[in-house]
Image (cartoon, helix red, strand yellow):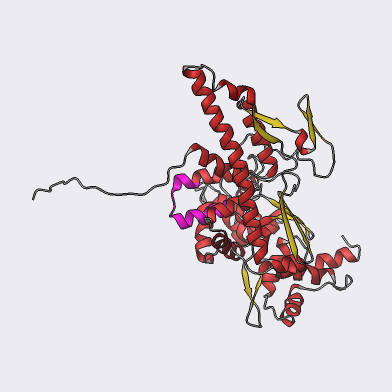
Amino acid sequence: MRNHLKPAQEQTVFLSLTPELLQSIRILQLSGGELLSFIEEQAAENPLVELDWKQRGMERKSGVRKKNDGVYPDVLNTVSDSRATLEDHVLGQLRMEGPPPDLFRAAAFLAGNLNDSGYLEGSLPELAGMLGISERRMEEALAVIQSLDPPGLGARSLQECLLLQIRRDPEAPRGTRETVERHLKAFAQGRWDAIRSDLQLSAEEMEDIARYIRSLNPRPGQGFASSHPPAAVPDVIVEYADGNVNITVNDAFLPRIRLNDEYARHLNDRLTGEERLYLQEKMQQAIALIRGIEKRKQTLLRVIAAILEEQRGFLEYGFFGLKPLNLKRISEKVELHESTVSRAIQHKFIQTAHGVFEIKRLFSAPLKSTKGGEVSAQSVKAMIRQIILNEDKSRPLSDQQISSIMSGMGIRVSRRTVAKYRDEMRIPNYSLRSASSTGKT
């Protein structure tokens, strides 16, 4: 039987990312300190870009900036180095893997929540709630992250980090996985005889296991450029009084950008060939830079305004007043894609009357209350912290007691959830708090 091949027309729609659009996307996701570094790089490469520091209350002499007013924090040490960040490294691998779009989106979101050691910050239910997807899908996304290099990436504890590395190494000594799974604390304390007895290992095998575990990397994210500025410089400043909200993008430490008039005039001269093309190209790049920075500012203002419109309770009561909120809700309010909203808030800080913190903390997963409504995970954390602050320091509360207190407040939180949130806030358990209050070590 003969197959006949016939030509057919197929109409497809795709988005062409122009250099200007790509640069605009990059500028949007930069923090304040990173944006400053980017602007200076562009000025060094483009003779048409001129930076005016005096308009911002700063002076620049011999390559050194000096602040005149001293109102804003110094961002000179917040500029990241030229190495790729861990997030960049992970996103590059994700693009090569090519998971389905919704899984890619979730995995990319998790990549933005890896700390500088490579560990995942935040619980999966909370992160899934922030993104507006199921916990199961977020678990699948985490599995994708944990399959990438370096091994151990995306772990939520030291134990998980070590196990991820062991499971990917077929030559790991016999008994290594069981040692880490069941006896990590005993291993750290040097109680090897108990481990050998339980796993029926020889002294030589135990030595091999110990040597192997010590060769593993407890911080697989190290070696990449930091994804966060060393100082919490606010990208957005919010003032709230008498029901009125004032939102300002903090660009006071950035220079004014303007075109170099002298070079611009050369465009009208009788230049020919490569010189004219070169100046035209640099003119387009300079204009794209100015537009990209302005677009970043306007997008950030829109997104923050939408977030605070949803989180009016936060403005009044701080984290106690946070309600559940995810990226999808804000995306719908500002009519921007979720990825754009995510880029706008990623690694950026907000200054409010309740402190300076990452903008993403204003998003929170929902938890059911016994009264039929929902509360945010962030507000529950704030309540747990407050309960512990108010406890009798000579008789600290256990996680179960905190759970019971919150149940009386109409919020159903299990003992394990209290323990998990307490650990995330780096608050010791009741026995350690008791030892601290009595001066024991």
Q: Residue 69: image x %, image y %?
A: 85, 40
Q: Residue 104: image x %, image y %?
A: 48, 53
- Please name the residue shown 56% across and 37% down the image: 288
Q: Is residue 252 visible?
A: yes
Q: Is residue 175 left or right of residue 5?
A: right
Height in image: 403 above or below 210?
below
Q: What count of labels does the image hold?
A: 0
Q: Is residue 114 visible?
A: no
Residue placed furthest toward the right: 439
Quadrant for the C terminus in the image = bottom right
- Please name the residue shown 76% across and 70% down the image: 384
Q: Nearer the viewer, residue 99 or 37?
A: 37
Height in image: 412 above or below 427?
below
Residues rendered magenta in the picture = 94-113
Magenta-drawn stretch contains 97: yes
Q: Nearer the viewer, residue 46 or 402?
A: 46
Q: Residue 420: image x %, image y %?
A: 68, 66
Q: Is residue 12 left or right of residue 147?
A: left
Height in image: 76 above or below 362?
above
Q: Residue 107: image x %, image y %?
A: 52, 54
Residue placed furthest toward the left: 1
Magenta-drawn stretch contains 226: no
Q: Is residue 2 left or right of residue 371?
A: left
Toward which corner of the image does residue 365 lie, by quadrant? bottom right
Toward which corner of the image does residue 32 lie, by quadrant? top right
- Please name the residue shown 88% across and 70% down the image: 393
Toward which corner of the image does residue 428 lie, by quadrant? bottom right
Q: Is residue 275 left or right of residue 438?
A: left
- Please name the residue shown 73% across and 77% down the image: 406
